């Protein structure tokens, strides 16, 4: 039997000239206590009707109403039940109304005695506060209603509430009838209505009445109202600070979960955009000297166009330059009429209005730019865009908040960079450790084996004087061969050390590439004169421009690549060397074979020092694993590139490197005499190396 029409609405229908006032909960609490204290201090037996929104509010005042019930038998307490509250006749009457009743949004206290009367009839302006609401926020709840000492108004209010009580508890009909006869007889009620409707409202409103019997309570309420306004203002300020701290903490917590710069920037821009409720928030990495930046991280609200992936102008952007110079945030409340934009454009005298283009294309009405700095170093930029329809006035707390978040982003980016550098350093240390292990394994294997052979041969020659000349020659050849093997190992170590340390003096000069190829082929065939080689096809023609390189080192690269191809290709296979011109500045040399091939994932690691496909000690082919590493250092020395290609095991491999063309050469005649190429012979100023 819940009712949707509130008691205040019913009372105002009877009193159309009365206008409700606004009260805070703290004020209503003070008024209620004043009215209750008046009952407790008096000698009358008044009618007391109190309506609480929830049972928990009633629990706070239950002891007071037990004392009030000792003063009068006509005490009625209404509340919405939550735990134990129910319809009951004890020291006073309790009425449990339904949670859907409008009384759940109302606050009523009516006191009618023989010598005085007062009523407080109010309705909450918003929904009831949540259970978890803090006391400060609870006291800020607002109500509208009537507080008066007018007996006629109090009697009308009591009559309305008593009807509601009788609906919920019909068994109290006789008691309610008795209360009406004593405190609000029917002839008096009818007379009240007629009299109230004929009087002016300004003579009946409590705040303009000259007949208020308790001016102290009136002043107290006024003081409480003013204090409550101050409290609300302070709470609003605290809420702003709390929001700022929560946003900073959420951004800090989120970005500390990752050391990935992209994740850090995306989390920051998302949290900041949501927290400040701007139309667009973007962040991009940049330095002071950058001409442009790519927008990679963006937050946009519904209906706002995205600019992610676009190129953002920096060099011709006066606002960016001003932020860099100030090392502080820059705010523009109205980008269309802001005089700074017009002034900057005039000062820069730009052929294109960059700022106007950005304002129009991105629909920017209000603009904030905040630099991301770390110890004075510019690492990026935060931008907030408001796209209208009305300009946004950036507050100091907004700027301070974005500055604080920008500081957190700068620290996080530095940490991410430090972590990335640490990872690179760890990888380098791991590579050095592998190099050390390989060096120990290879040198131990490559030196111990020939030393053992040399030792056995020399001991045999020394202890067996009757050895036949043929066997003696075999022993000497084996010893010499292994000695040469050791010399080559040491020479490779020295060569790679020279190249990596940068101590090599390059003798760059114009060269005939075909002659260099022929010389490298001669070296390879000379070294393998006692071992069968696969078929080697030379497709390098004489119709090539001169190149500009160090001839001795070029022959070294060609010889090592050819030697490597022959080593991993069977006698039935084929090795091809050819040259192509894919660039006006470079020739591309390719050494291809039909040998065992290289796994695609190892195409980069084959150029590492001491790399051995089968392991340092389990390989079927000899060598130190330094040939390709030396070749890479040489090619990089003249500014070229070297790389490998292969489809996998048993599909052969191709090694490519580039060599610069001699740009000042005169076009050669088809028939010309070949130069003697003195640069290809070892020079006395350089250490001799064995090919």
Image (cartoon, rainbow, N blue to C red):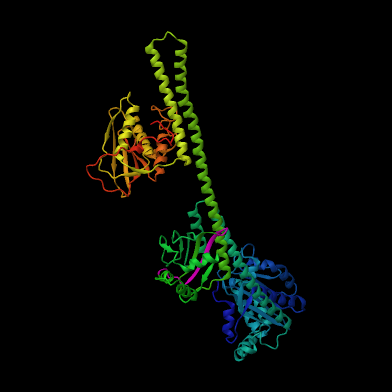
Residue 239, position in %: x, y? 60, 67
Image quadrant containing the C terminus: top left
Residue sitting at x 40%, y 40%: 634
Residue 51, position in %: x, y? 64, 73
Q: Is 608 in front, or is 519?
A: 519
Image quadrant containing the N terminus: bottom right
| 576 up-or-down from 161: above or below | above
Q: Is 61 in front, or is 134?
A: 134
Q: Quadrant of residue 74?
A: bottom right
Residue sitting at x 35%, y 34%: 559
Residue farthest toward the left in the current orientation of the protein: 671
Residue 488, position in %: x, y? 42, 29
| 447 up-or-down from 497: above or below | above
Q: Is residue 546 left or right of residue 23?
A: left
Magenta stretch: give its range: 361-376
| 29 up-or-down from 436: above or below | below
Residue 84, position in %: x, y? 64, 62
Q: Is residue 343 visible?
A: yes
Q: Is residue 511 left or right of residue 424?
A: left
Q: Is 80 in front, or is 290?
A: 290
Q: Is residue 214 visible?
A: no
Q: Is 376 in front, or is 56?
A: 376
């Amino acid at each position: 039997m819940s009712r949707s029409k509130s008691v205040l609405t019913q009372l105002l229908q009877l009193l159309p000239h009365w206008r409700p006032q606004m009260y805070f909960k703290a004020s209503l609490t003070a008024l209620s206590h004043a009215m209750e204290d008046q009952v407790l201090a008096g000698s009358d037996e008044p009618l007391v009707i109190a309506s609480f929104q929830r049972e928990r509010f009633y629990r706070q005042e239950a002891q007071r109403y037990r004392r009030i019930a000792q003063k009068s038998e006509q005490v009625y307490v209404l509340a919405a039940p939550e735990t134990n509250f129910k319809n009951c006749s004890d020291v006073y009457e309790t009425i449990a109304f339904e949670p859907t009743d409008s009384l759940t949004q109302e606050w009523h206290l009516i006191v009618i005695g023989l010598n005085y009367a007062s009523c407080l009839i109010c309705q909450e302006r918003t929904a009831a506060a949540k259970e978890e609401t803090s006391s400060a926020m609870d006291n800020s709840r607002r109500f509208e209603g009537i507080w008066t000492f007018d007996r006629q108004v109090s009697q009308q209010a009591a009559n309305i509430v008593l009807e509601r009580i009788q609906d919920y508890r019909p068994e109290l009909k006789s008691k309610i009838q008795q209360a009406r006869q004593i405190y609000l007889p029917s002839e008096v009620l009818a007379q009240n209505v007629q009299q109230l409707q004929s009087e002016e409202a300004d003579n009946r409103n409590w705040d303009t009445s000259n007949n208020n019997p308790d001016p102290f309570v009136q002043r107290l309420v006024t003081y409480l109202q003013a204090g409550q306004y101050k409290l609300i203002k302070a709470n609003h300020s605290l809420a702003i600070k709390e929001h700022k701290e929560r946003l900073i903490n959420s951004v800090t917590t989120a970005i500390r979960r990752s050391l990935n710069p992209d994740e850090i920037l995306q989390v920051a821009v998302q949290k900041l955009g949501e927290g400040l409720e701007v139309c667009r928030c973007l962040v991009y990495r940049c330095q002071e000297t950058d001409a442009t930046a790519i927008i990679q991280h963006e937050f946009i609200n519904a209906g706002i166009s995205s600019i992610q992936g676009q190129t953002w102008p920096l060099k011709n952007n006066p606002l960016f330059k001003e932020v860099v110079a100030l090392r502080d945030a820059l705010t523009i409340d109205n980008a269309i009429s802001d005089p700074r934009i017009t002034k900057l454009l005039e000062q820069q005298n730009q052929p294109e209005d960059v700022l106007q283009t950005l304002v129009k294309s991105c629909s920017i009405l209000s603009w904030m730019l905040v630099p991301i700095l770390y110890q004075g170093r510019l690492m990026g930029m935060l931008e907030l865009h408001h796209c209208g329809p009305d300009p946004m006035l950036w507050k100091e707390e907004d700027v301070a908040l974005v500055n604080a978040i920008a500081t957190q982003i700068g620290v996080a980016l530095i940490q991410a960079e430090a972590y990335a550098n640490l990872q690179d350093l760890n990888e380098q240390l791991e590579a050095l450790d592998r190099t050390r292990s390989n060096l120990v394994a290879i040198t131990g294997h490559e030196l111990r084996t020939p030393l053992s052979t040399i030792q056995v041969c020399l001991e045999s020659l020394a202890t067996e004087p009757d050895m036949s000349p043929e066997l003696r020659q075999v022993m000497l050849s084996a010893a010499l061969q292994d000695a040469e093997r050791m010399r080559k190992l040491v020479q490779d170590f020295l060569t790679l050390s020279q190249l990596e340390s940068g101590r090599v003096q390059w003798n760059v000069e114009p060269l005939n590439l075909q002659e260099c190829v022929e010389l490298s082929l001669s070296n390879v065939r000379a070294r393998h004169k006692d071992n069968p080689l696969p078929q080697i096809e030379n497709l390098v023609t004489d119709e090539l421009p001169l190149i500009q390189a160090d001839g001795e080192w070029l022959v070294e690269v060609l010889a090592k690549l050819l030697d490597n191809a022959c080593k991993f290709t069977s006698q039935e296979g084929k090795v091809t060397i050819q040259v192509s011109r894919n660039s006006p500045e470079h020739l591309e040399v390719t050494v291809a074979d039909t040998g065992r091939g290289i796994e695609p994932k190892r195409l980069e690691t084959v150029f590492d020092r001491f790399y051995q496909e089968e392991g340092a000690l389990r390989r079927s082919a000899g060598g130190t694993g330094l040939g390709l590493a030396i070749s890479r250092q040489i090619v990089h020395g003249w500014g070229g590139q070297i790389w490998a290609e292969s489809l996998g095991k048993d599909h052969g491999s191709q090694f490519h490197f580039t060599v610069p063309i001699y740009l000042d050469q005169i076009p050669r005649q088809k028939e010309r005499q070949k130069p003697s190429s003195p640069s290809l012979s070892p020079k006395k100023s350089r250490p001799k190396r064995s090919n």
